[in-house]
Structures are given as structure tokens and as C-alpha cells.
Image (cartoon, rainbow, N blue to C red):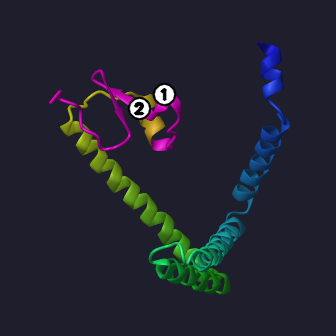
Amino acid sequence: MENQLQQSIKHWYLPLILGILLILAGVWVFATPLASYITLSLFFAVTFLVVGIFQIFHAVNNRNDLEGWGWYLVGGILDLVLGILLISQIGASMLVLAFFVGFGVLFRSIMGIGHSIELKKQGANKISVHDVIVFLSGKNTGKDRQIIYNGYKMPYSYTRKSDGS
């Protein structure tokens, strides 16, 4: 068994290197918060630029196969222009990033409240700390994909308990 495990795990040092790099990045973020925020804002802007280029490329190359390919092209052009604007105006990029994250958190919170109301309607009234951590972390793998409420296994979606009918 051990030999099989050793053969299946190659490049064991890559997660170690990644972990060390992430620790160094975390220390850098704590040591220089403003520079970190500016760097993150620039990365955010470049992401829009790159996504726009790829969307335009995708739309043009698949124009004969995609119905409504023009919308992909328009979306790509808008992302490209937004990326250029955000790169040229790093202050605007910092502001847009803050709103982007803020709205993301707001929508996720509203979705979580709606999900909890839906679960309550389905009769779910017992939940463990583990269930909350797994749900909030977004880890949807293996056994963690389902939460058990009152003996019923429920996935992280708005599904109703089957009443047998």
C-alpha cells in the first residue's frame, strides 16, 4: 500500500513551495497593505483586459457556430475597454474593486439568507458547526457536498424533500 502511494504522489515538493510562497505573500500583504491593494487592483484591471481579449477571440473564431456570437463580441469589447480604463486609472480600479467585492459579499449574503429560509421551510432545524464551515467555505467535494438535516441528506441547492408523491 505504501509503495502504491509513493508511486502515485509525484512532485510532492510543489505544494510545499506553493505554501512557502503564499506565506511570503501574506507577510508582504500585512507589511505593505497599500502597495498590496494597488497591486491587487492592477491585477483586477489586467484580468478584465485579458478576459476581453479572450472573449473577442472566442467570438470571432466561433462566429459560424455560435448563435448570437455578436453578444460575445460586444461583451469582450466592453471588458477590453473597461480593462484599459482601469489600467490607466489605478484609483478607479481600486474603487471598482472595492465595489466589486462589496456587491459580491452582499449578493452572497442575500443568497445565504434565502437559502436558510428555504431550508427552514423544508424542516431543517439542526445544523452543526462543521456544516456551517463547509457551506461558507464553498468546499463542494465528496461527503461535504451534502448536509444532513433531521436525517435527510440535502445538497447545497434549493431542493425539496421528497414526500413520496
- The residue shown at (82%, 33%) is 12
Give neighbour class at mark 2: few <14, some 14-19, many 20+ (Cα, 10 Å). some
**Position of residue 39 measured from the top left corner of the image (x, y, whole percent):** 70, 69
Residue carrying label 2: 146
Q: Residues within 10 Å of mark 1 (few under 14, many from 20)?
A: few
Which part of the image, by quadrant, shows the N terminus?
top right
Q: Residue furthest top?
A: 1
Q: Is residue 17 left or right of residue 161?
A: right
- Amino acid of disc 2: Gln
Quarter of image, res 128: top left
- 124 in magenta: no
Q: Is residue 122 left or right of residue 47?
A: left
Coordinates of residue 156 in the picture (x, y in percent): 38, 40
Distance between the Cα atoms at labels 1 and 2?
A: 6 Å
- The span shown in magenta is 136-165
Q: What amino acid does circle 1 point to?
A: Lys
Q: Does the magenta run of residues contain 152?
A: yes
Element type at mark 1: helix
With respect to residue 81, does 2 lie above or below?
above
The residue sitting at 50% across, 73% down in the picture is 66
Return the residue at label 1: 143
Asked if the residue under mark 2 is in contact with the one under mark 1, i.e. CB atoms within 8 Å, the reply is yes
Q: Quadrant of residue 62?
A: bottom right
Residue 72 place in picture, x, y as percent: 51, 77
Which residue is nearer to you in this view: 120 or 65? 65
Residue beneath the point at 24% across and 43% down: 118
Near-viewer residue (49 or 117): 49
Query: Would residue 61 appear left or right of 29 to someone viewing this image?
Result: left
